[in-house]
Image (spheres, rainbow, N blue to C red):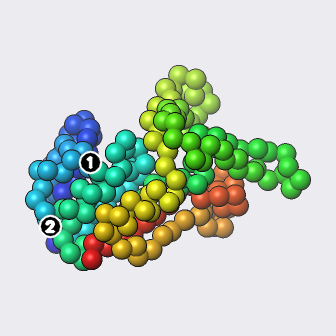
Amino acid sequence: MGANMTGIDISSRLIEHARQAEQKELLSIRYEVVSFANLTIFSNDSFDTAVSTMALMDSPDYEKAIAEIYRVLRKQGDFFFSISHPCFMTEGFGWVTGGRESKPALTVSGYFSKKQWIERWQFSRVPEEIRKDTPLFAIPRFPRTLSEYINTLIQAGFVLKQLGEPRPSASECHKYPYLQKWRDAGALFLHIHCVKP
């Protein structure tokens, strides 16, 4: 659509995959191995829009990342990002079944804990015959409250435009029944749109 795009990731392997995909479908996207907490390869006011998808909650230095994103955005620049919902995705997250209505209930504990931890998980739809041989993902977690996420944006100078807590639609739950618990019990994701004034 005519936009000049730059993609970044701290993983050189992921950037190499992206560059290989670019060779198959030339879109003139620039890819750089860099951390979003240190964007010094870019000058101030370099971008009209910044987008981060499911990454900022995994950063040990969210505050520095937000300051850097603010710095490289032009005035009136938009910043869109998604994270795991901090109110629900805590170390004490879990599901309880067998309640009065036999619907799974979401459990949350340790919301205010500052203890960093490693989350280990596997896609629930991994076929049973390979499940035991499929390694678990190991994701470092740096817990923050909702207010810490929002107040960091405000302190950096951003103006909030919209928050979203998407939930599966009824038709998606009909097609994929395992999503129903997320429609009923809590939000898995938090979407934020803010602007540099």
Query: At which x and y percent is residue 135?
Result: 49, 26
Where residue 84 is drawn, which disc sits there?
Answer: none
Number of numbered markers:
2
Residue type at the position of mark 1? Ala
C-beta proximity under 8 Å, tags 2 and 1: no
Q: Nearer the viewer, residue 64 or 59?
A: 64
Tell me which residue sits at (66%, 51%) in the image. 178
Where residue 45 is drawn, which disc sits there?
Answer: 2
Residue type at the position of mark 2? Asp
On screen, residue 172 versus residue 107, left or right, reads left
Query: At which x and y percent is residue 23?
Result: 15, 49
Q: Is residue 21 visible?
A: no
Picture layout, residue 8 above or below residue 28: above
> For mark 2, does the 10 Å Cα neighbourhood hold few (<14), some (14 to 19), or many (20 or more) residues?
some
> For mark 1, does the 10 Å Cα neighbourhood hold few (<14), some (14 to 19), or many (20 or more) residues?
some
SS label for mark 1: loop
In this view, the residue farthest toward the top is 133
Q: CA distance from mark 2 to mark 1?
A: 16 Å
SS label for mark 2: loop
On screen, residue 170 versus residue 159, left or right, reads right
Tell me which residue sits at (38%, 55%) in the image. 53
Where residue 37 is drawn, which disc sits there?
Answer: 1
